[in-house]
Image: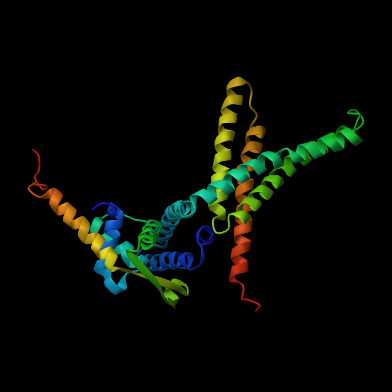
Amino acid sequence: MWLLGLFTVGTEGESIVGDLHEEYSQLALKSEYGVARIWYWRQALKTVVHLYGMGFRGAPWSTAAVIVGGFLLMRFVSGLPDTMLSAVTDRYLTYWSEHFRAYVWMLNGMAIAHPIAMIFVGGLVAFVAKGRELVATITLALALSILVGVAVLWVGAHGLIGITWILWSCADPLAIMAGGIIVRTRRSLAASLPSRA
Amino acid sequence: MAGRDYLGEFEHIIVLALLRLDDRAYGVTVRQEIELRTHREVSIGAIYATLDRLEAKGYVKSHLGDPTPERGGRSKRFFHVTPKGVAAVNRIHRVLQSMTEGLDVLRSYS
């Protein structure tokens, strides 16, 4: 239900979840619990795909514009952690031999700061694409995944490729989606709270 | 005939299901009716996606029912076919009748 709630808006989502709940209950009474669970998950996943398509078709140009904007923002933001940390190391850590531990700490910092920056990008894209948060962030993550896949193949064809680099590259699309999920979940919670008026 | 919109295959099936179900037409009953008569599993998402498209075209209208406990306190969304939707169904049936006239479509080839 949480998964469907990420893609549906208002009463439409309520109806879809209600329908699945009703049929799942009917099936659980007639057959085994496990059969009903499998049916429910199969239906939920197929429904998510359709809801994704519906979300995109509802406003294709504005959604595409948000995705392109997100891609440009991502290009700008992705270099910031490296730039900032390099500025710190150039300013304060000029001797490699004396500051080796600090350099290692900085390198680890880059590995952590980069996904956080991507969560920020995903969150901002989701914030702008109100009502289509997951459609926009998933599409952006898919586009990035394709580029990452091409890069992995190219690097692999031209030299050694480390598993760490692959994992680090896969983190960005997941972080973008995480940002979208966070914004969407908070919006849904805010909408479900009673009005203070 | 210029400018008229013909129903797609799945849209056609959905509208016929709504006409069969009359006042009882909502997501669950529509899905079960289609599955029963076509022997193919359809997802509730596909049904709602098509119903939304049909509603945007003015062929179908929906309204919310009361919440029920077997649905976890959630409301049903009932659908019914508009006169424009009935006209669209009649139009496609006339087209199909015209196209199949004189053809033995049930003939088996040995």
Q: Nearer the viewer, residue A131 or B1?
A: B1
Determine the residue positioned at 77% across, 37% down. Answer: A82
Residue A150 image-quadrant placement: top right
Visible residue check, residue B37: yes
Determine the residue positioned at 11% across, 47% down. Answer: B105
Q: Residue B52: where, in percent of width, then height?
A: 39, 61
Direction from residue B27 to residue A154 in the image, left or right: right
Determine the residue positioned at 66% across, 48% down. Answer: A121
Q: Nearer the viewer, residue A109 or B101?
A: B101
Q: Residue B41: where, in percent of width, then height?
A: 32, 55
Query: Vertically, is A82 above or below B81?
Result: above
Direction from residue A95 to residue A148 in the image, left or right: left
Residue A105 image-quadrant placement: top right
Q: Nearer the viewer, residue A41 or A56?
A: A56
User: Farthest top residue?
Assistant: A158
Query: Vertically, is A170 above or below B16?
Result: above
Visible residue check, residue B18: no
Q: Which image quadrant: the C terminus of chain B?
A: top left
Q: Nearer the viewer, residue B85 or A164?
A: B85
Query: Vertically, is B27 above or below A161?
Result: below
Determine the residue positioned at 15% across, 48% down. Answer: B99
Q: Residue A2: where, in percent of width, then height?
A: 54, 61
Q: Residue B59: where, in percent of width, then height?
A: 32, 63
User: Farthest front residue?
Assistant: B2
Direction from residue A32 to residue A79 in the image, left or right: right
Residue B19 image-quadrant placement: bottom left
Direction from residue A122 to residue A64 in the image, left or right: left
